[in-house]
Amino acid sequence: MCPKTFHLLVISLLSLSVSHGEDFNPEICQDKPDGTQVRNPFQCNMFFICEGGMIDENEGMCPDGLLFNPDPAGCDIPANVNCGAVPLPPGFETEAPTQTPPTEGPTTVLPTTQQPDRERCPEEDPEEPVFLSVADDCAAYILCFHGREILRKCPAGLQWNKLSDDCDDPTKVTCPEHNLYGCPEDGIDFLPHPDGCRRFIYCRDGFARVQGCSPYHGYDVEKKTCVFNVACWT
Protein backbone atom coordinates (compact mmCIF):
# COMPACT_ATOMS: atom_id res chain seq x y z
CA MET A 1 0.00 0.00 0.00
CA CYS A 2 1.33 3.44 -0.85
CA PRO A 3 1.88 5.88 2.10
CA LYS A 4 -0.87 8.24 0.89
CA THR A 5 -3.45 5.44 0.80
CA PHE A 6 -2.34 4.25 4.24
CA HIS A 7 -2.65 7.71 5.77
CA LEU A 8 -6.12 8.20 4.26
CA LEU A 9 -7.16 4.82 5.69
CA VAL A 10 -5.83 5.70 9.15
CA ILE A 11 -7.61 9.08 9.11
CA SER A 12 -10.85 7.36 8.13
CA LEU A 13 -10.48 4.77 10.92
CA LEU A 14 -9.61 7.41 13.52
CA SER A 15 -12.69 9.41 12.52
CA LEU A 16 -14.79 6.29 12.80
CA SER A 17 -13.34 5.52 16.23
CA VAL A 18 -14.35 8.98 17.49
CA SER A 19 -17.92 8.58 16.25
CA HIS A 20 -18.20 5.10 17.81
CA GLY A 21 -16.41 5.94 21.04
CA GLU A 22 -13.86 3.16 20.38
CA ASP A 23 -10.07 3.30 20.64
CA PHE A 24 -8.09 2.67 17.46
CA ASN A 25 -4.32 2.25 17.44
CA PRO A 26 -2.93 3.32 14.03
CA GLU A 27 0.32 1.45 14.78
CA ILE A 28 -1.44 -1.84 15.48
CA CYS A 29 0.51 -3.57 12.67
CA GLN A 30 3.93 -2.15 13.55
CA ASP A 31 6.61 -4.90 13.81
CA LYS A 32 4.04 -7.60 12.97
CA PRO A 33 4.82 -10.15 10.21
CA ASP A 34 3.05 -9.82 6.87
CA GLY A 35 -0.29 -11.62 6.89
CA THR A 36 -0.90 -11.10 10.62
CA GLN A 37 -4.60 -10.68 11.37
CA VAL A 38 -5.73 -8.12 13.97
CA ARG A 39 -9.23 -7.34 15.19
CA ASN A 40 -11.25 -4.56 13.62
CA PRO A 41 -12.44 -2.53 16.66
CA PHE A 42 -15.70 -1.56 14.93
CA GLN A 43 -17.24 -4.98 14.18
CA CYS A 44 -16.50 -8.33 15.81
CA ASN A 45 -16.67 -10.45 12.65
CA MET A 46 -14.11 -8.33 10.77
CA PHE A 47 -10.34 -8.02 10.92
CA PHE A 48 -7.40 -6.17 9.39
CA ILE A 49 -4.46 -7.82 7.61
CA CYS A 50 -0.98 -6.43 8.23
CA GLU A 51 1.33 -5.88 5.27
CA GLY A 52 4.72 -4.16 5.56
CA GLY A 53 4.00 -3.03 9.12
CA MET A 54 0.83 -1.21 8.01
CA ILE A 55 -2.87 -2.02 7.81
CA ASP A 56 -3.79 -3.32 4.37
CA GLU A 57 -6.65 -1.43 2.73
CA ASN A 58 -8.56 -4.70 2.19
CA GLU A 59 -10.48 -5.70 5.32
CA GLY A 60 -11.17 -9.34 6.12
CA MET A 61 -14.58 -10.68 7.10
CA CYS A 62 -15.43 -14.02 8.71
CA PRO A 63 -18.04 -16.32 7.12
CA ASP A 64 -21.65 -15.91 8.28
CA GLY A 65 -22.16 -17.10 11.85
CA LEU A 66 -18.49 -16.81 12.87
CA LEU A 67 -16.64 -14.08 14.77
CA PHE A 68 -12.99 -13.03 14.77
CA ASN A 69 -10.95 -14.46 17.64
CA PRO A 70 -7.71 -12.49 18.17
CA ASP A 71 -6.05 -15.23 20.22
CA PRO A 72 -5.39 -17.41 18.37
CA ALA A 73 -6.06 -15.20 15.35
CA GLY A 74 -8.79 -16.61 13.12
CA CYS A 75 -12.52 -16.97 12.59
CA ASP A 76 -14.18 -18.99 15.34
CA ILE A 77 -17.56 -20.03 16.69
CA PRO A 78 -19.23 -17.37 18.90
CA ALA A 79 -18.88 -19.49 22.06
CA ASN A 80 -15.10 -19.12 21.87
CA VAL A 81 -14.99 -15.37 21.19
CA ASN A 82 -15.14 -12.50 23.68
CA CYS A 83 -16.01 -9.41 21.67
CA GLY A 84 -15.96 -7.14 24.71
CA ALA A 85 -16.97 -3.63 23.63
CA VAL A 86 -16.57 -4.45 19.93
CA PRO A 87 -20.04 -4.42 18.29
CA LEU A 88 -21.55 -7.59 16.86
CA PRO A 89 -22.64 -7.68 13.20
CA PRO A 90 -26.18 -6.36 12.54
CA GLY A 91 -28.79 -9.01 13.30
CA PHE A 92 -26.23 -11.41 14.80
CA GLU A 93 -27.51 -13.80 17.45
CA THR A 94 -25.34 -15.96 19.68
CA GLU A 95 -26.38 -19.41 20.85
CA ALA A 96 -25.08 -21.07 23.99
CA PRO A 97 -23.42 -24.41 23.13
CA THR A 98 -24.16 -27.58 25.07
CA GLN A 99 -20.46 -28.52 24.98
CA THR A 100 -17.37 -26.34 24.78
CA PRO A 101 -15.17 -27.49 21.89
CA PRO A 102 -11.36 -27.29 21.91
CA THR A 103 -10.15 -23.77 21.11
CA GLU A 104 -6.47 -24.25 20.30
CA GLY A 105 -4.72 -23.20 17.13
CA PRO A 106 -5.60 -21.06 14.11
CA THR A 107 -8.73 -21.49 12.07
CA THR A 108 -9.15 -22.12 8.36
CA VAL A 109 -12.55 -22.57 6.68
CA LEU A 110 -12.08 -25.42 4.21
CA PRO A 111 -13.76 -25.51 0.79
CA THR A 112 -16.51 -28.10 0.55
CA THR A 113 -15.09 -29.73 -2.59
CA GLN A 114 -12.05 -31.33 -0.96
CA GLN A 115 -11.51 -35.07 -0.50
CA PRO A 116 -14.92 -36.44 -1.59
CA ASP A 117 -14.18 -39.90 -0.18
CA ARG A 118 -13.93 -38.87 3.47
CA GLU A 119 -16.49 -38.17 6.18
CA ARG A 120 -18.38 -34.88 5.84
CA CYS A 121 -19.89 -32.38 8.25
CA PRO A 122 -23.70 -32.58 8.57
CA GLU A 123 -25.59 -29.75 6.87
CA GLU A 124 -27.44 -28.92 10.09
CA ASP A 125 -25.78 -28.86 13.50
CA PRO A 126 -26.98 -31.52 15.96
CA GLU A 127 -27.31 -30.72 19.66
CA GLU A 128 -23.68 -31.69 20.32
CA PRO A 129 -20.70 -30.25 18.37
CA VAL A 130 -19.33 -32.55 15.67
CA PHE A 131 -15.59 -33.09 15.25
CA LEU A 132 -13.81 -34.91 12.42
CA SER A 133 -10.26 -36.19 12.13
CA VAL A 134 -7.90 -34.95 9.42
CA ALA A 135 -6.40 -37.98 7.70
CA ASP A 136 -3.20 -36.26 6.62
CA ASP A 137 -2.46 -34.28 9.79
CA CYS A 138 -2.64 -35.88 13.24
CA ALA A 139 -2.16 -32.50 14.95
CA ALA A 140 -5.32 -31.06 13.36
CA TYR A 141 -9.07 -31.65 13.55
CA ILE A 142 -12.22 -30.29 11.93
CA LEU A 143 -15.01 -28.53 13.82
CA CYS A 144 -18.36 -28.67 12.03
CA PHE A 145 -20.43 -25.47 12.12
CA HIS A 146 -23.65 -25.27 10.10
CA GLY A 147 -22.20 -27.51 7.41
CA ARG A 148 -18.88 -25.65 7.24
CA GLU A 149 -15.60 -27.41 7.93
CA ILE A 150 -13.39 -25.32 10.22
CA LEU A 151 -9.81 -26.58 10.42
CA ARG A 152 -8.30 -26.25 13.91
CA LYS A 153 -4.82 -27.05 15.23
CA CYS A 154 -3.91 -28.74 18.50
CA PRO A 155 -1.32 -27.07 20.77
CA ALA A 156 2.30 -27.92 19.98
CA GLY A 157 3.19 -31.46 21.01
CA LEU A 158 -0.40 -32.76 21.08
CA GLN A 159 -2.40 -34.76 18.54
CA TRP A 160 -6.11 -35.19 17.87
CA ASN A 161 -7.74 -38.13 19.66
CA LYS A 162 -10.94 -39.04 17.78
CA LEU A 163 -12.06 -41.32 20.64
CA SER A 164 -12.20 -38.49 23.19
CA ASP A 165 -12.79 -35.63 20.71
CA ASP A 166 -9.92 -33.69 22.20
CA CYS A 167 -6.23 -32.90 21.76
CA ASP A 168 -4.23 -35.53 23.63
CA ASP A 169 -0.78 -36.90 24.39
CA PRO A 170 0.66 -38.55 21.24
CA THR A 171 1.24 -41.78 23.18
CA LYS A 172 -2.54 -42.15 23.48
CA VAL A 173 -3.22 -41.49 19.80
CA THR A 174 -2.86 -43.85 16.84
CA CYS A 175 -1.38 -41.75 14.07
CA PRO A 176 -0.16 -43.01 10.67
CA GLU A 177 3.45 -42.00 10.12
CA HIS A 178 3.79 -42.78 6.42
CA ASN A 179 4.72 -40.04 3.97
CA LEU A 180 1.54 -39.03 2.13
CA TYR A 181 2.96 -36.20 0.04
CA GLY A 182 6.44 -37.25 -1.06
CA CYS A 183 8.41 -35.09 1.35
CA PRO A 184 12.21 -35.37 1.05
CA GLU A 185 13.78 -37.61 3.68
CA ASP A 186 16.16 -34.90 4.91
CA GLY A 187 15.80 -31.20 5.64
CA ILE A 188 12.89 -28.76 5.49
CA ASP A 189 10.76 -28.11 2.41
CA PHE A 190 7.35 -26.70 1.43
CA LEU A 191 5.05 -28.38 -1.09
CA PRO A 192 1.66 -27.41 -2.58
CA HIS A 193 -1.37 -29.25 -1.20
CA PRO A 194 -3.11 -31.43 -3.82
CA ASP A 195 -6.57 -30.10 -2.86
CA GLY A 196 -5.89 -26.43 -3.60
CA CYS A 197 -3.85 -23.40 -2.63
CA ARG A 198 -5.55 -22.59 0.67
CA ARG A 199 -3.28 -25.15 2.33
CA PHE A 200 0.31 -26.30 1.83
CA ILE A 201 2.60 -29.07 3.08
CA TYR A 202 5.38 -28.39 5.57
CA CYS A 203 8.04 -31.11 5.27
CA ARG A 204 10.65 -31.87 7.91
CA ASP A 205 12.96 -34.88 7.57
CA GLY A 206 10.41 -36.91 5.63
CA PHE A 207 7.41 -36.06 7.80
CA ALA A 208 4.55 -33.97 6.42
CA ARG A 209 2.32 -31.50 8.25
CA VAL A 210 -0.57 -29.67 6.61
CA GLN A 211 -0.60 -25.91 7.20
CA GLY A 212 -3.32 -23.39 6.31
CA CYS A 213 -2.92 -19.92 4.79
CA SER A 214 -4.61 -16.86 6.31
CA PRO A 215 -7.98 -15.75 4.89
CA TYR A 216 -7.67 -14.17 1.41
CA HIS A 217 -4.18 -15.69 1.10
CA GLY A 218 -3.11 -18.68 -0.98
CA TYR A 219 0.05 -20.73 -1.36
CA ASP A 220 2.34 -19.50 -4.14
CA VAL A 221 4.35 -22.44 -5.53
CA GLU A 222 7.20 -20.30 -6.87
CA LYS A 223 7.61 -18.15 -3.74
CA LYS A 224 6.91 -21.13 -1.43
CA THR A 225 4.84 -18.97 0.89
CA CYS A 226 1.26 -17.73 1.34
CA VAL A 227 0.59 -14.48 -0.51
CA PHE A 228 -2.35 -12.09 -0.45
CA ASN A 229 -5.04 -12.29 -3.14
CA VAL A 230 -3.38 -15.12 -5.07
CA ALA A 231 -5.28 -16.09 -8.24
CA CYS A 232 -6.41 -19.50 -7.00
CA TRP A 233 -8.23 -17.93 -4.01
CA THR A 234 -11.08 -16.92 -6.32
Image (cartoon, helix red, strand yellow):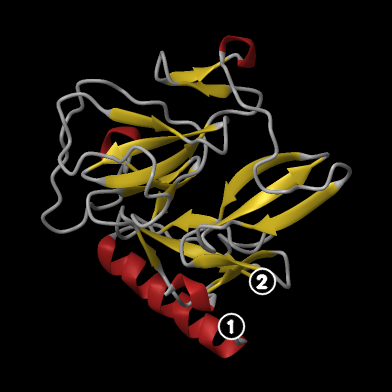
Q: Which mark is residue 1?
A: 1
- Give the image location of residue 90, x and y in percent: 15, 59
Looking at the image, residue 193 lies above or below residue 104: below
* Residue positioned most to the top: 172
Q: Position of residue 193 (x, y in %)?
A: 59, 56
| Residue at 60% in and 48% down | 211
Residue 166, image quadrant: top left
194 versus 85 height, above or below: below
- Residue in view at x 40 percent, y 72 percent: 13
The residue lying at 16 percent from left, 30 percent from top is 126
Residue type at mark 1: give it.
Met
Which quadrant of the figure has residue 154?
A: top right
Q: Is residue 58 above or below residue 49?
A: below
Within 10 Å of disc 2 (Cα), the crowding (few <14, some 14-19, many 20+) is: some
Relative to residue 180, is residue 100 drawn left or right? left
Is residue 79 visible in the rendered image? The answer is: yes
Tell me the CA gap for discs 1 and 2. 8 Å
Front-most of residues 1 and 173 = 173
Residue flagged by tag 2: what amino acid is it?
Gly
Q: Secondary structure at mark 1?
A: loop
Relative image position of residue 213 (x, y in whole percent): 55, 57
Question: Which residue is the site of mark 2?
Answer: 52
Mark 1 is surrounded, within 10 Å at the Cα level, by few (under 14), some (14 to 19) or many (20 or more) other residues, namely few
Q: Is residue 118 left or right of residue 199?
A: left
Residue at position x 61%, y 85% in the image:
3
Say if mark 1 contacts mark 2, CB within 8 Å: yes
Identify the image quadrant of residue 168: top right
Does residue 81 appear in this view? Answer: no
Question: How many marks do you count on the picture?
Answer: 2
Which is nearer the eye, 167 or 176?
Answer: 176
178 and 137: which one is in front?
178
